[in-house]
Image (cartoon, rainbow, N blue to C red):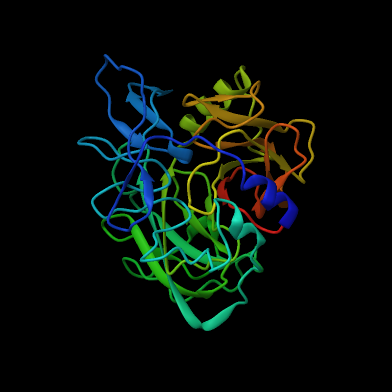
Amino acid sequence: MKAAVAGLNSLRIPVEPTSTGNSGVRVVTSRAGVTINAPSVCYRTFMHWCVMRLPLLVSFAVGCAGSAPGAFSGDGGSAGGGGSASDAGVLDGPNPLRDGSASGPFACGALPAPTPDPSTQLELSISYTDNSTGAPPENTVVRLCAAADPGCSTPRTTLQGGGAGNGGSAGGTGWVKLRADGTVSTKVELGFEGFFEASATQYPPTFRWTPRALRNPKTNFDSVLLRPAEIKFLTDQALGKPGSYDSTGHGIVFVVAQDCDQQPIAGASFTTSASDSLMREFYIINSSPSTTDTKTDSLGRGGFINVPPGVHTFTVFAGEGRTTPIGSSRVQVRAGAVSSVTVSPSAT
């Protein structure tokens, strides 16, 4: 991995126009879009997509990477005004992914993973939005679980929100209602790795996995909940035919590739340890899902449709040759569920 990092440090990877928010971390705030001449509202969706809410139709339009009146930022958080920086978290002060000897956007991949340390507490939060309304989801509960507990038999009891909740058909314990603004928050130990699980009758089970071994002092995720009709539109468009997503026996996994500065990685390709004849890899190119492209655009987004259930590893490589690994993350995939994960440089 160190040799790979050394090679990556010499690469120049283009990113979207940026500005600096109050956190001191460069954040994406604007990008070229598509002119929309129909009444629409720009809402957050997975991987910085932006969709128009039109009668009975969800269509991919422009990439939302910044905040503007009547618009929301993408899944990585809101830009400017002291908002969230990116999926990998908001940093207060120097980037803790770096040490005195590390430099370059991939150097953190050569650092050892932090040893879990309960004496060092990190702030962790997530904000949910209903894609259809642009508002906080109604009647939705969330819980937080460790990666080593994929069935969430022992959810974290420190999660705070709008009060204790009931998981309903999802079962289990540890459920917390969302606050009025759609958020829940907690503190976790240095080195925590796990996932948020959201449950509601109007959405499929939705999981947001943390990057490997958290070390940032503060991490905030933004997550959008998609309804079954919206997921059907997305997958039909990606695979080019109706009914292409088999939700009864498979799941969907969205992947975002980011460097040590929490910037998206362009020109990256993805692999997974999962194997299934129905599974298809896709990339988000110019805000639309594509199964013909073989690498990411400047926003570093993509994923897999029809992933079989189980614990699978998702790896990001530099370029299409897939000879230089950047990092990997593990995800517990569930049939009918939507999962998303950020992959940052790590010792794969």
Residue at position x 57%, y 64% from top? 194
Against 116, is 268 above or below? above
* Whole-percent x, y for residue 101 in the image: 58, 66
Q: Quadrant of residue 113?
A: bottom right
Residue sitting farthest toward the top: 37
Residue at position x 38%, y 25% from top? 62
Name the quarter where the C terminus is drawn. bottom right
| Camera-nearest residue between 267 and 234 | 267
* Whole-percent x, y for residue 305 in the image: 64, 34
Q: Is residue 94 left or right of residue 41?
A: right
Q: Is residue 287 left or right of residue 32?
A: right
Name the quarter where the N terminus is drawn. bottom right
Q: Is residue 317 left or right of residue 134?
A: right
Q: Quadrant of residue 115?
A: bottom right
Q: Quadrant of residue 332?
A: bottom right
User: Can residue 1 be seen here?
Assistant: no
Against 134, is 207 above or below? below
